[in-house]
């Protein structure tokens, strides 16, 4: 991904510091972070809905002003993510400079990756989430109420950035869409207790917590008409 080898922790520290500085300058001291308001009110970036927009969002400079053009989306979180990503692109030169990398020495993919990292951490800032998640028992739905501009998926993936070892699984319409761990190598399929938890959440449409076979599994529904997503957070006993 990088032309220059850098420790991941160093990259994350630079991104987190840039997020903290931006939020402090904008006088945002608690969630939720409204990235549209941040872009327009603090950074002077005009956000425009464009019904002809083919992709989710694009940025361009016109008449000496930077614009972000958004395709209309059914969920506000998608607009928030797109603008957060474009803010990441906006600050990318500063991030590269802080990492000691010349922009011409970095691959295009690196800029994309930095923007993604920045977007995740802007919507869900590390210091806040690091305190809020364990305080509410890692309850995804409670966290969604507090970080309402971030999607359930973004919040769930941020569990992997916390010190507590866990596995995060996202299941869409009964099929595993994403499954990641911050501590162990995981198989693509669910453990038996994870399967039971996912099935209960899928059929009942309500959160579930199960413990068996050395696992503790939390599951939450993200259900819409014609589409069901379940998100699991799994911890192995003795590793929490």
Image: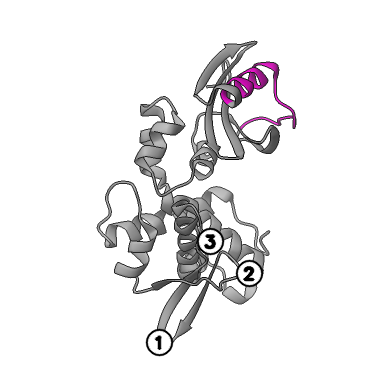
List the residue tagged with mark 2: 106
Q: Earlier in the sequence, mark 3 or mark 2?
A: 2
Q: Residues within 10 Å of mark 2 (few under 14, many from 20)?
A: some
Q: Looking at the picture, how far across and down is residue 223, in whole percent?
A: 54, 36
Q: Residue furthest left?
A: 27
In the image, 228 versus 84, the foreground residue is: 228
Distance between the Cα atoms at labels 3 and 2? 13 Å
N-terminal-most mark, 1 or 3: 1
In what element is the residue under mark 3? helix
Stretch in magenta? 183-201
Q: Position of residue 27 (x, y in %)?
A: 25, 58
Q: Nearer the viewer, mark 3 or mark 2?
A: 3
* Element under disc 2: loop
**Can the viewer see residue 19 in this picture?**
yes
- Residue 80 sits above or below residue 178 on the image: below
Q: Quick check: 239 above or below 31?
A: above
Taking the spot 42% from the left edge, 54% from the top edge, the residue there is 122
Disc ID at residue 115: 3
Q: Please tell me which residue is depicted at 52% across the width and 18% down the height of the picture.
A: 209
In the rendered image, which residue does mark 1 sit on? 64
Callout 3 environment at 10 Å: few (<14), some (14 to 19), or many (20+)?
A: many
Residue located farthest toward the right when viewing the structure as drawn: 188
Q: Relative to 73, does residue 30 appear above or below in the rendering? A: above
Whether residue 94 is visible, yes or no, is: no
Q: Position of residue 210 (x, y in %)?
A: 55, 15
């Amino acid at each position: 991904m990088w032309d220059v080898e850098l420790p991941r922790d160093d990259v994350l520290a630079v991104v987190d510091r840039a997020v903290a500085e931006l939020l402090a300058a904008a006088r945002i001291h608690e969630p939720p972070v409204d990235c549209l308001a941040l872009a327009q009110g603090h950074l002077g970036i005009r956000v425009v809905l464009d019904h002809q927009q083919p992709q989710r969002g694009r940025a361009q400079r016109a008449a000496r002003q930077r614009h972000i053009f958004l395709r209309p989306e059914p969920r506000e979180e998608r607009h928030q993510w797109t603008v957060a990503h474009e803010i990441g692109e906006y600050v990318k030169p500063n991030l590269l400079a802080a990492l000691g990398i010349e922009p011409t020495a970095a691959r295009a993919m690196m800029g994309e990756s930095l923007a993604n990292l920045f977007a995740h951490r802007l919507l869900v800032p590390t210091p806040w989430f690091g305190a809020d998640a364990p305080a509410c028992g890692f309850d995804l739905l409670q966290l969604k109420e507090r970080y309402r501009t971030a999607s359930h998926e973004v919040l769930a993936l941020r569990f992997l950035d916390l010190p507590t070892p866990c596995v995060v699984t996202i299941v869409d319409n009964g099929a595993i869409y994403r499954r990641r761990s911050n501590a162990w190598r995981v198989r693509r399929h669910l453990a038996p207790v994870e399967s039971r938890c996912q099935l209960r959440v899928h059929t009942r449409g309500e959160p579930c917590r199960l413990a068996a076979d050395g696992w503790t599994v939390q599951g939450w529904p993200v259900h819409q008409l014609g589409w069901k997503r379940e998100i699991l957070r799994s911890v192995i006993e003795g590793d929490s």
